Amino acid sequence: MSRIHQALSALRSHDGSAIRPGRPADDALLELLVHMASTDGVFDDEEMALLYGVVPGWSPTQFRALIGRIIAEPIDLQRMAAAWDSDDARWTALRFAARMACRDGRFDPEERSFLQDLADVLNMSNALDRVLREVAGPPADRLDPTRLAALVASLNWGAAVFLPGPVASEDLKPVVPNDATPVVRVGVDHAEVMGIYAEGLVARFLEGVAFLPWAKIVGCTSGTTLESSVRLNTEDGRAWSLVDARMSGIAMLIDRLHRTDADAPTSAAPDIRRVVAKDPTWDDSGQG
């Protein structure tokens, strides 16, 4: 194995690429999802599918035991919130809870109330409407290839270079759906590293090459070590890590895709006028 491959192997994402029972933050997240799913008294198949997805190695017997243990105890949002010790962790918890609430195709008043209580405990009351928009996915008009290309170009990506068309790299092409609509290819240092499509994006992540549909991206979190610059969290509980900081512009893109027009400043620009002084000013008052 070459030194570069040894280095990459050493940097493999072992601390965040998936939800792992046994870690306090992840245990709290699983507990939250179970309580969210049980709010209406019924565990729908789609809700169970989300649970199965975030811990793919578990058997139905293990999940039944987990559910039985959790619902037997009263919910304690304050205790769970204490396990999410960063803004990224709190955003992730609220986002996953919202996904679970809407998973069965219904959004009952009890579920809205639960989410509001959670947002209040996390000091994120103003974030709930944004999170619910994310569950619905980006508006279709923003994913129009022409508009999406313009949005990508408007962001500050630093040294990244963009070219129109589908990805051409042999490792990226096979994972792109055949019917995906290409928007731009993204490269750094003369190497193609990402492709943006109307349906999602393809990239080389620390965890491997993958195509992530926009609708499956729960949100972005910041990397806290050399392991990654930004991570994209997906519905299956995975986190896909981008090592190169020049690719962190993807977080800005995902943010813009979910903003409403109301999020933009609405006040008029200030009226700045040129002033002509009639009396001597500080820089010429000493002249005779």
Image (spheres, rainbow, N blue to C red):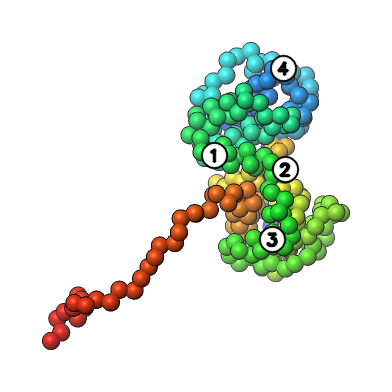
Tell me the distance, in whole angstroms, between the alpha carbons under discs 2 and 1: 19 Å
Residue that badge 1 annotates: 127
Element type where label 2 sits in the image? helix
Q: Amino acid at mark 4?
A: Ala
Mark 2 or mark 1: whose residue is earlier in sequence? 1
Frontmost of labels 1 and 3 is 3
Element type where label 4 sits in the image? helix
View extreme (bottom): residue: 288
Number of callouts: 4
Residue that badge 4 annotates: 65
Q: Residue 226 versus residue 231: which sits nearer the camera?
A: 231
Tell me the distance, in whole angstroms, between the alpha carbons under discs 2 and 4: 28 Å
Residue that badge 3 annotates: 147
Is residue 52 shown above or below 168? above
Element type where label 1 sits in the image? helix
Is residue 6 visible in the rendered image? The answer is: no
Frontmost of labels 2 and 1 is 1
